[in-house]
Image (tube, coloured by chain):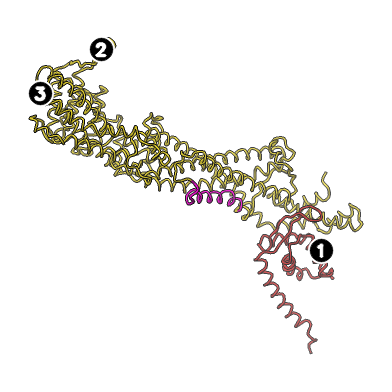
Amino acid sequence: MEFDSELMRGVVEPIVLRLVAGRAMYGYEIIKVVNEQTKGAFAWKEGTLYPCLHRLEADGLVSSEWRDAAETGKQRKYYSITRKGTALLKAKTSEWTAFAGAVNAVLLAGAPA
Amino acid sequence: MNSPRDAYIAEVTAGLKGDPELRRDVGAELASHLDAAFDEARAGGRTEEESMDAALKALGNPVTLAGDLVDANRGRMRLRTVLRVAVGALLVPAAVVLALWMTRAAAERAQIIMVLTSAFSGSASPGFFSYEKTEQKVVSRWRLGPRERIVVFGDRTKSTRTEQQKALCDLDPSNRIFRANYIRYLLTDCDAKRMDTEEFLAELGAAEELDPDNAYYNYLAAGVMAGKATEWVVSDEGTNSITSLLIRDTNLLDRAMDEFQRGVAKPFCKAYASDLLALRRSLLPSSENMGDEVVKIGLTAGVLLPHLSHYRNLARVLRERMSASAQAGHKVEATQESLRLVQFAEDLVSDAWSLIDILVAQAIIGIAEKQVVTILDQAGMHEEAADLRVRAEAAAAPVKTWRESVKNSDPSVWEGKAGVLAALLLSSIGSEGITDAELEPGRRLDRIMGEQALLMNLILVFLTLILVAGLLALRWRRVKGSESAPFLILPGAGEAALIVSVSVVLPVALYGLYSRFSGLSGREFAVTSNLPRFIVELGSLGLFILVFSIRLSLRHVKRRCVALGVPVPSSAWAWLAVWRSDHGLYLGTAARSLIPTFAAAILLLAGAVQPWLAHEETRWMRVDHLLSQDNAIGGFTSVETRLVNRLKSEMLEALRRADPEAKGSDATNK
């Protein structure tokens, strides 16, 4: 299912923050994990991820580090969440929970009489 | 030929070409992504071409992605541009300018130290050109008012030194100190035949009118006239050389003797040399560094003492006159002349402020003790000879004892504890009464000078490294062209702080703790007592700073180059073949990227460490009571003044102990 780009735009950053909050991840890995965890519902354009990651890094929400990839020996750029990112993620998660709850309360209620 | 992957990356990152490092970083990241997607597709059974096409397509339209990447990195590029400009236009030029300025300051300091060393060792100064430049700088910092300037230096706008000092006299014509000073300059003119003798004697007369009870002008007049009226002639008699006095002008010599007698009859003799020095010093601020001390030493040395040679000659002439009187049987006259000679010596001792004064007085007492006594004995005046011998021997004893003590002194008392300058001084005047508290500032200052020398050398090395690195970077830029030119890798704030802290701040702080607060550094001993150790300490510090600043910076650069896909040599030996290396981009980038580290090191060392050392220098100079001109108590140095005062007091006591009036002479008691 394709989602409205307006809907998607607002959740890309929180999702990325959530993923890198768990462990440091590189760009391609983030794409794969999102795809897996959403069971293919979010098939992001891979190119849009990197500008997003760079914005997050410029805003100080994530930090990056080049590391050797264990399996290939090549260098990959891993992203981790920062303290500022953690605080924002928490705020965004609360915001989303409240938002989703409010929307669900209306959208999923019975039809009006 | 570029592969589709490389062509895609080049197109997508084209908007970032203003920041080569960022462009390479983003390019490497996208390349890593494409490689991962390619590998996955290949693992799924696709061909290479299909795998890469799929990977490129998944990334999306390169134009759109290029625009998104520029938008996302705009702020960062701007900040990085500002940083690069700050480094290139501010940090590095500031460091270079500061380093060059400090080099000049260090060269002047080296000259100052040479001047100081020659002053305290009594050897020839390296030349006054450096003193005059130092003086100009120091005096401009002191901000003396016009009157103060004239009091301290004379009026430097006048062409001759005598005229310069005359201006001081003109400031206050009734001031005896200024007048005596001016008279000394006139005396040098008279000695150099730039001034007529009678003209000089007229000036002496005018000075005497201002200070009628002061025998100084009478002694000067007597000395000058005696010198003009006589000549010492050396003749060979067999294997011996005989020196005899030839009287060329009997009338002038008689005038000289009359003048001398008038002087002996006066209550005191004062040249006001130490008064002038004390007055000048009182107008000057406390010394802050060696340059200030050199100027003050110059002032001290600038107090002329041309009268002393005339005194010595006068005493020798008096001896000859006395001999003639004794041989002619004029016993009363001979006795009176011998007593006047002793009185003359007593006057000189009373007015002594430097060791030179004491030694001249001692020489005159020696004439009395040996030669005059012999003359009296030979003339059959044994009683008078015995009286004079007792008095002169007692008066000469303090200096003789002191000379013996200097010759026999144990230098180990101060050798391991005294600074270089103090050691020079103490080796010539002895170390009686010296305490460790007095020796400490000097040896601390020696350490500080050594540390400043290390600092200077380090700064010069870093400056040279900036130059070499710049040439290397330029060379590889020319070889590689602008598209793949060496670029500047700037560390992040954390990494930069780490490099600077570990390579400069930490070692300096540890050295400071070790040298100033621990009991391990040997600061209780003179640097010269364990010079190899001091050199090793400083050398280790310098080497640590140099090696670690380069190592840590290179480590960062290498890591980044690996991440950015810049081929990095596997061995450090590649640096030995920098001009012909296959790793030109890495070497050029590394060279260029090391420059900010070197510049930061220079700024830290020159901007923080040097001021700290300068502060320490000022602190120790202010408490230096051994050599400091500020604490010199009216003499050349406090230790010399202490010695002079002791000798003076003992000599005067000896001279006045025997009461000549009880022997029937008509010498005046003063």
Disc 2 and disc 3: Cα gap in Å?
A: 29 Å
Disc 2 and disc 1: Cα gap in Å?
A: 116 Å
Residue B628 is situated, as x and y percent measured from the top left of the image, at: 35, 42
Q: Which residue is mark 3?
A: B333
Q: Nearer the viewer, mark 2 or mark 1?
A: 2
Image quarter of residue B254: top left
Q: Is residue B363 left or right of residue B18?
A: left
- Element type at marker 3? helix
* Residue closer to the observer: B32 or B456: B456
Residue B260 is situated, as x and y percent measured from the top left of the image, at: 15, 27
Name the residue at the bottom extreme. Answer: A113
Q: Is residue A17 left or right of residue B447?
A: right
- Secondary structure mainly formed by the magenta segment: helix
Which segment is the magenta one? B498-521
- Look at the image and tell me whether residue B163 can be seen: no
- Point out which mark residue A32 bears: 1
Q: Nearer the viewer, mark 1 or mark 3?
A: 3
Name above or below for residue B209 compared with residue B440: above
The crowding category of the residue bearing disc 1, from other C-alpha atoms within 10 Å (few below 14, some 14 to 19, many at least 20), is: some
The type of residue carrying mark 3 is Glu
Q: Kindly indicate whether the residues beneath marks 2 and 3 are on one polypeptide chain.
A: yes
The type of residue carrying mark 2 is Ser
- Element type at marker 2? strand
In the rendered structure, the residue with mark 2 lies on which chain? Answer: B
Q: Is residue B404 left or right of residue A12?
A: left
Q: Which hue belongs to chain B?
A: yellow
Spot the red chain and give its letter: A
